[in-house]
Amino acid sequence: MHDPGYAAKADGPIARPYPEVNAGEPAHVCRLLEVVQTLAPRIAAQRNEFDSGRRLPDTIFAALADAGLFRLWLPQTLGGPELSSFAFMRVVEACSALDGSVGWLVGNGAGMSRIGGYLDEAVVREWYADPRAFVASATGAVGTATAVAGGYRLSGRWPFGSGAHHATRFMVLASTRPGDPASPLLCCYPGRADVTILDNWHVSGLRGTGSCDFEAQNVFVPAAHAHPFLGLQPTQPGLLYRMPPSSVFAWSICGVPLGIASGAMTSFTELAKGHSGNRAALRDREIVQATIGRTRAMLCAARAFLIDAMTELMAATDIGGQRLVEARADVRLANAHAAETATSVTEMLAAGAGAVAIFETCALERAVGDVRAAAKHIAMSPSNYITAGRLALGLDPGTARF
């Protein structure tokens, strides 16, 4: 059964494909979605600062943190909401519809709050006692972790530290035996004072995420601040923490491209209602009407595949075996398909808008850059098609990180 928090509202605005708040929502999900909408004017007013600063303004980050949007997967036993997978996706999608960078940081930051289900409870309580706690994660490189008394000495440089400027902790991958491909990887969590942020985030999309490289040199990480990357054992009983970590990691950002495309559809619809000189409004053109209908169908289908894949992963988690292997492959497949579809939808809408969509003042221009950037993430890579195809053909996944 699908999560009731993802029920669609029949009488919502036809142009906005992501479901609206309705009476059937759990109260805490309604509150979160309502808070997201109250932040819309502030985000719109400061959006130009996203580009000039190449990070979220401190006031916007603080507003998101104060709303609890960076701890959506923190266990209930530790004071968090522990949202279901579907409610989490819905909140991330709503944030992304307002702005891709906002949605990206909510997906990443809130996704990392799931560490509360794996680390020692006392450690997590200490970290999240800070109401603005934010863990920036980077898995695009592997550092070194040399075992010493009580923990590890960590060194390395990692890319794509989304939210690095505001992060209170960083999650990085490290090997205890550098140069040995068979060495198990560790997830280590150095503090903000232990890393140096490198100001290299000059990009064409998701400019407000501040996803800079960062590095650490010979930093001590206590053993309690590290855990295995693979074969992770949960410390909390919830299904969220029992599901394969790599699958849930991929899920944490799947709502971003869909939300960006949903926001683009809203922008296009508003644009299509206007008039230009003596010309009829865009919405009166049959080709524009068809574009709205087609893109809506595409987004709804992509979302349905995601929900179906996660539903199966949840059912297969405690069964295991081949069923779980196939479910994990389908989650990655649905992620890649959703990102691909959202990119196509956004580009179709920008094309339908015509020359106005090339101006920086047009929301569609930003949406195209943001959705293209989001789709580059490894969790949504076209290589997921290869992995799913290999498994369907009776081969191994072809990747150690599956």
Image: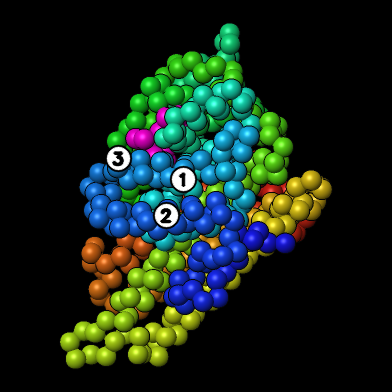
Residue in the foreground of this view, choosing between 173 and 96:
96
Tell me the element at label 3. Answer: helix
Amino acid carrying mark 2 in the image = Val
* Mark number displayed over residue 36: 2
Residue occupying image coordinates x 45% and y 85%: 290
* Left or right side of 151 for 95: left
* Mark number displayed over residue 69: 1
The answer to which image quadrant residue 114 occupies is top right
Amino acid carrying mark 3 in the image = Asp
* Up/down of 114 relative to 325, above or below: above
* Residue picked out by circle 3: 58
Amino acid carrying mark 1 in the image = Leu
The answer to which image quadrant residue 65 occupies is top left
| Magenta stretch encompasses residue 316 | no
- Give the Cα distance between marks 2 and 3: 17 Å
Residue in the foreground of this view, choosing between 212 and 168:
168
* Up/down of 221 relative to 311, above or below: above
Looking at the rendered image, the quarter that the C terminus falls into is: top right
Q: Marks 3 and 1: CB-CB under 8 Å?
A: no
Looking at the image, is mark 2 or mark 3 nearer the viewer? 2
* Mark number displayed over residue 332: none
Q: Earlier in the sequence, mark 2 or mark 3?
A: 2
Which residues are the magenta region?
Answer: 158-170
* Left or right side of 306 for 258: left
| Magenta stretch encompasses residue 161 | yes
The reply to whether residue 343 is visible in this rendering is no
Neighbourhood count class around disc 1 (C-alpha, 10 Å): few under 14, some 14–19, many 20 upward: many
Q: Earlier in the sequence, mark 3 or mark 1?
A: 3
Residue in the foreground of this view, choosing between 13 and 389:
13
Q: Marks 1 and 2: CB-CB under 8 Å?
A: yes
Residue occupying image coordinates x 63% and y 47%: 247
